Amino acid sequence: MSCITPRPALERVVPVPHGGHHSNLPPGDLLDFSANINPFGPSPRIWEAMQRVKIDRHPDPRATPLRCALAAHHRVEPSALLVGNGAVDLIYQLATACVRPGDHVLIVAPTFGEYAAAAVMMGAAVVVHRLLPEHGFALDIEALTRDVERFQPRLLFLCNPNNPTGTCHPRAVVETLLTAAPDTLLVLDEAFVNFVAGHWQAAALLNYPNLLILRSMTKDYALTGLRVGYALAAPEVIAALEKVQPPWSVNALAQAAALAALEDEAHLHTTLAQLAQASAALRAGLTAQGCAPLPSAVHFSLLPVRSAPDAAHWLLRRGILVRDGTSFGLPHHIRIAARCPTDNARLVAALAAGKEELCAEKC
């Protein structure tokens, strides 16, 4: 084998499509409903904090001040938490640290595509437990438990609230899985949990050694371009992640911004409340026009359409970017994420004008 020949597993890795960009148009020419982030932006304190950063120095190699602040925020020891360059960075490090060629990795889908990509990269056999739109994407815990018992997966990925469906799973579901699969590491991705008012606290389950919680500060705190995420787990799991994480994974600007964001929780709560109102109004507006999105616990929703690629293209020609659901295995759904009220009104008007052509019969 040539020294430049990639590992065989990499031949099966394909790029995962994501929302939030379109190469053919400048960002200023689009209203972007494809990226499910906080559209009201980051705290003003973040800009002040970043201006004080000395970029001619190395940042803390393990983001220690931020790590300690996040640990205090969640009432855990710093040894039970690791900060990364976004949650995606930690997903790939988790696969590197834990997955061996031939291991099974079980994924509850439709969901974030990087779980499978990271597992395939390490030579895993990916098993998909698919939830169906005709059943409201409801999770049959008994069926999922049977898959766990059958495949004995190394990792089980469960996104909660789920992207792209916006569905939430209660604490009882997570506890059932943790109990049923003591030798499987349950990766509970809570990237969107702060968008759900009063959601139960998964950190209370960290006494289970087979639980790892992923969190992202790019969505709720609007640090998307800076990339900050973190993992919560038993110290031995975190120690394994540390061994494969390169030093200086989180740059100095991102560390300073994240610390400033944590110090301004009032901004977070205010903007998330505004977003919840805007999201409710958007759903009401679409429903009134006969294009009702599916139920969702968060600010993004799936909208049934006749053809997701056609609908996405039709809206793009009108300066509106939405997420084509085809890459999620949902070719008859687009995902839309609420923005500010004036932007949402433009989306409602566009879909109202095109509903006869775009919307599914049951919309």
Image (cartoon, rainbow, N blue to C red):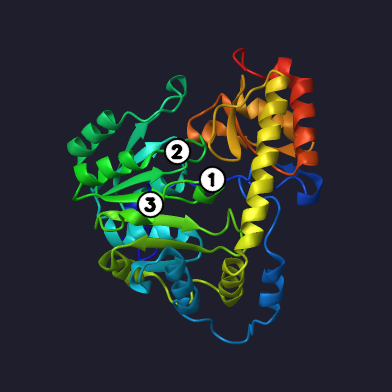
58, above or below 21, in the image: below
What is the three-letter code of the residue carrying label 1? Ala
Q: Residues within 10 Å of mark 2 (few under 14, many from 20)?
A: some
Residue that mark 1 sits on:
197
Q: Disc 1 versus disc 2: distance between alpha carbons?
A: 12 Å
Disc 1 element: loop
Q: Which residue appears at 60% of the width and 38% of the height?
A: 300
Picture coordinates of residue 48, whole percent (x, y): 71, 75
Q: Give the side of residue 255 with respect to residue 208, left or right.
A: right
* Occupied quadrant, residue 281: top right
Verify CB contact (< 8 Å) between mark 3 and mark 1. no
Amino acid type, label 2: Cys
Looking at the image, can residue 317 be seen?
no
Residue at the image point whose x is 54% and y is 28% from the top:
295
Disc nearer the start of the sequence (1/2): 2
Above or below, 46 relative to 150: below
Which of the two marks, 1 or 2, is nearer to us in this view? Answer: 1
Q: Which residue in the protein does label 2 denote?
A: 168
Q: Which residue is mark 3?
A: 202
